[in-house]
Amino acid sequence: MYIKEANTFDRAAICELVGTIMQEHSINLDLSNRDSDLKDLSYYSDNNGKCLIAVDNGKVVGLAAGRPETEGEFELVRLCVAKQARGRKLAKRLLSKIVDFASANGFEHLVVEPARQKYATGASLLTHCGFNFTSDPVEDAQPVWYLALKPDLKAAS
C-alpha cells in the first residue's frame, strides 16, 4: 500500500470510494452540490490545497483532502478509508500527511467540520490525533474540530 497525490485519472476511483462509504450511512453522493469538489480535483491543487489517495493492489482505498479555509486555518475536507482497508491505521497516516502539509505551509490550525466527516471519521480518531472541540459563532454555531499546528504562545505565558 502507498499514498500519493491524486490526479485527474484518479477521479472515478475516488468518487467510487466516497460513494461507497457514504452508502454505508445511507447518504448518496451528490456531485452537483455537496460533493462538487470531487468533480474536478483541481479544486484542491488550484486553491493551495492537497488531495491524497491511498492505493492498495491498484485500488484506491483511502482519501484525504484539504484546502485553506481562512487565514491561518486549513480545512480537512475529506478523510475516508474503504471498509476492507480499515484497522491498519491508514486514516491516521493520511491525516498525518495533511497535517504535515498544512504545517509546512504556515497554517496555524487544521479544522474539521463534523458534518463533513460524519460518514468518514469519528470523533475518537480526531481526539486521539490531538484535535480539540470548539465552536465558531460567526459561521452557524456548528461545532468544529481543530488541531493547533503551532504552539499557542498566549496560553504558554
Image (spheres, grey):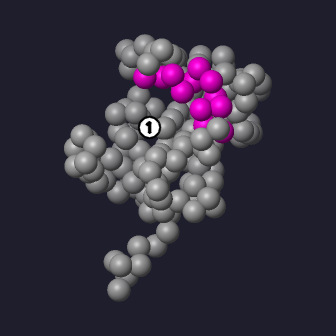
Up the image or down, 53 lies above or below 144; here it is: above
Give the image location of residue 120, x and y in percent.
45, 32
**Does dot 1 land on a helix, a strand or a loop?**
loop
Image quarter where the N terminus lies is: top right
Where is residue 102 drawn, in percent x and y? 57, 55
Residue 157 vertical placement versus 70 (above, below): below
Residue at image location 75% in from the left, 22% down from the top: 9
Nearest the viewer among 144 and 19 is: 144
Q: Residue at x 41, y 45 (%)?
A: 112
154 relative position to 95: left or right: left
Looking at the rendered image, the quarter that the C terminus falls into is: bottom left
Nearer to us in this view, 83 or 18: 18
- Position of 122 relative to 102 (above/below): above
The residue tagged 1 is 121
Residue found 39% across the figure and 54% down from its top: 146
* Residue 41 falls within the magenta-colored stretch: yes
Q: Position of residue 99 (x, y in %)?
A: 56, 54
Residue reaching furthest bottom?
A: 157
In the rendered structure, which segment of residues is drawn in magenta? 34-45
Which quarter of the figure has residue 15? top right
